[in-house]
């Protein structure tokens, strides 16, 4: 039984789909996905059995150094969902182009 759950995700609606289903046009949250429901159930069970809250942190990984419209949409949806599901959102590791370019040579 962990005290903190860290869920990494890339800045894409493909990764966001693990948390919730989103309307493709309005970006309205239509419902929670299976992973989010499992985490909610685990948090509820932990609170009931031990009277201890499980801290849930969603970490955004591979953040681009340039702002994009998609990044703003993901951020807006995550903020809304975090209020609904009770998780914290943090920026994670920025994408390093050098790591990707030099991968083949070690």
Image (tube, grey):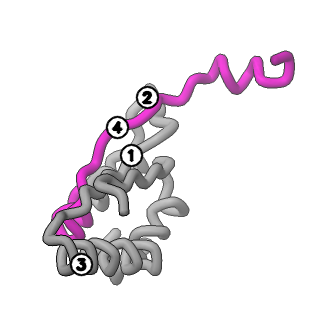
Question: Is any part of residue 73 visible from this angle?
Answer: no
Pick whichever, 85 or 22, lies toward us: 85
Instruction: Identify the residue at the far front of this view.
Output: 50
* Residue 15 at least partly seen: yes
For the point 34% across and 82% down, which residue is it? 31
Q: Secondary structure at mark 2?
A: loop
Please report whichever mark, 4 or 2, sits nearer to the chain's N-terminal start: 2
Residue underneath mark 1: 59
Frontmost of labels 3 and 2 is 3
Q: Residue at x 22, y 78 (%)?
A: 49
Which residue in the protein does label 2 denote?
Answer: 66
Q: Given contact means CB atoms under 8 Å apart, are the residues at marks 1 and 4 in contact?
A: yes
Of circles 4 and 3, the one toward us is 3
The reply, left or right, for residue 35 in relation to residue 42 is right
Q: Position of residue 33 (x, y in %)?
A: 43, 78
Q: CB under 8 Å between callouts 1 and 2?
A: no
Label 1 or label 4, whichever comes before in sequence order? 1
Q: Residues within 10 Å of mark 3 (few under 14, many from 20)?
A: some
Circle 4 sits on which residue? 91
Point out the stretch of residues depicted in magenta: 79-106
Name the residue nearer the viewer: 71 or 54.
54
Is 103 rendered above or below residue 90? above
Mark 3 and mark 2: Cα distance apart in space: 38 Å
Which label sits in the foreground, 3 or 1? 3
Q: Is residue 33 above or below residue 73?
A: below
Q: Position of residue 98 (x, y in %)?
A: 65, 17
User: Residue drawn 48% across and 68% down?
Assistant: 18
Q: Which of the two discs, 4 and 3, labels the residue nearer the N terminus? A: 3
Cα distance, mark 4 to mark 2? Answer: 14 Å
Considering depth in this image, is 33 or 45 the residue closer to the camera?
45
């Amino acid at each position: 039984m962990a005290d903190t759950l860290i869920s990494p995700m890339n800045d894409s609606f493909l990764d966001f789909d693990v948390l919730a289903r989103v309307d493709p046009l309005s970006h309205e949250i239509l419902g929670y996905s299976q992973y989010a429901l499992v985490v909610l159930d685990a948090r509820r069970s932990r609170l009931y059995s031990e009277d201890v809250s499980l801290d849930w942190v969603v970490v955004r990984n591979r953040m681009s150094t340039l702002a994009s419209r998609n990044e703003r949409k993901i951020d807006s949806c995550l903020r809304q969902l975090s209020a609904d599901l009770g998780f914290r959102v943090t920026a994670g590791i920025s994408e390093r182009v050098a790591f990707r370019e030099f991968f083949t040579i070690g």
